[in-house]
Amino acid sequence: MIKLLEIENYRRLQSFKFDGFKRINLITGANNIGKTSLLEAISFATLENPDSVVLNLFQILQRRDPELPIRHKNEPVDSFIRDIKKRYKFFKIKSNLTKIVFESSDSIEYLFEVKVNDKVRKYIQIVNPYMLPDVDTKHYVFIVDAGGSIIKLKELYKYVQANEDEEFIDENIRLFDKNIEKFKIINDEPSVKIKNLNDYIPISELGEGLKRFIFILLAFYKVKDKKNSLVLIDEIENGIWYKNYELVWKNIIYLSKKFDVQVFATTHSKELIESFVKVIEKENFEDMSFIELLQDGYMHFDKDTLKLEIENDFEVRGW
């Protein structure tokens, strides 16, 4: 697992060093403090070759600007290089697992010309933002938007089917929403069975919360049995009703232990943090850390100190 992380000059994180990441790591802080940047830096912290670094940069740009491939469809590689030069200068990311040094924006052209193989170059040409390959980033899933891509949801479900664990997903969906009985791929469309209705309906017709919950569950199945496996979740509470927060955390703890996956998640929600404390207390789960990013550094809490802060209603996320 990632235990140590050092960041130099990556977006808002000019200088960051932390030694003490655990299996589940929850990160909070004010708007524009660098929470998403920290998740992005963590996504570099297990990469091992230049191909992956280039592709990860492309995926990061795409997550921040989903229309980027569409606007640049006539010259995707050249425009990608241009965007990298515009948005990135020197940065360095080091963990106990690897070290990534992006010397300058000019180095991206060298990576394309010399280091990036034809397979990656071909993939960069693909306009559809949801058809990008994983190359050697198959060991992590980065969840950003409220619900998640329908296409990726369908792809992730294949890992559940291969594990023959469909009933586990259905059981948790019923706990999440008592009116929903099953989840299936029907006519190539992720769909759910509603009580008292004969037909399945596309999940896209329902609220984003259910889709996001399913997406989180499925992510663990994709990265199971992978080296340095990670699930990264930005603003984990998005679209999810607060009464379901404990269910979310119970599953994250269970699946992270079952499949040996490390989790990094960000939040703005006081209720989500409180539910996190409740669940780790009930589960007697110690393998966690809580970090509040500040303008001039961070504060770190283990299980006991976080519980004490919550019980005394102290400041742990700006509320």
Image: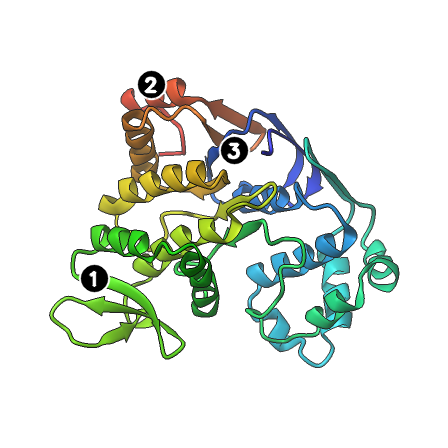
Nearer mark to the viewer, of 2 and 1? 1
Residue 246 lies in what quarter of the image? Answer: top left
Q: Which mark is residue 83?
A: none
- Give the mark, 2 or 3, whose residue is nearer the N terminus: 3
Percent x, y of residue 112: 82, 62
Residue drawn at x 68%, y 43% is 10
Percent x, y of residue 319: 35, 34
- Give the mark, 2 or 1, whose residue is nearer the N terminus: 1
Give the residue type at disc 1: Glu
Percent x, y of residue 294: 53, 31
Give the residue type at disc 3: Leu
Q: Which mark is residue 181?
A: 1
> 144 or 203, which lies in front?
203
Residue drawn at x 20%, y 62% is 180
Q: Read off the residue under disc 2.
A: 308
Residue drawn at x 26%, y 74% is 201
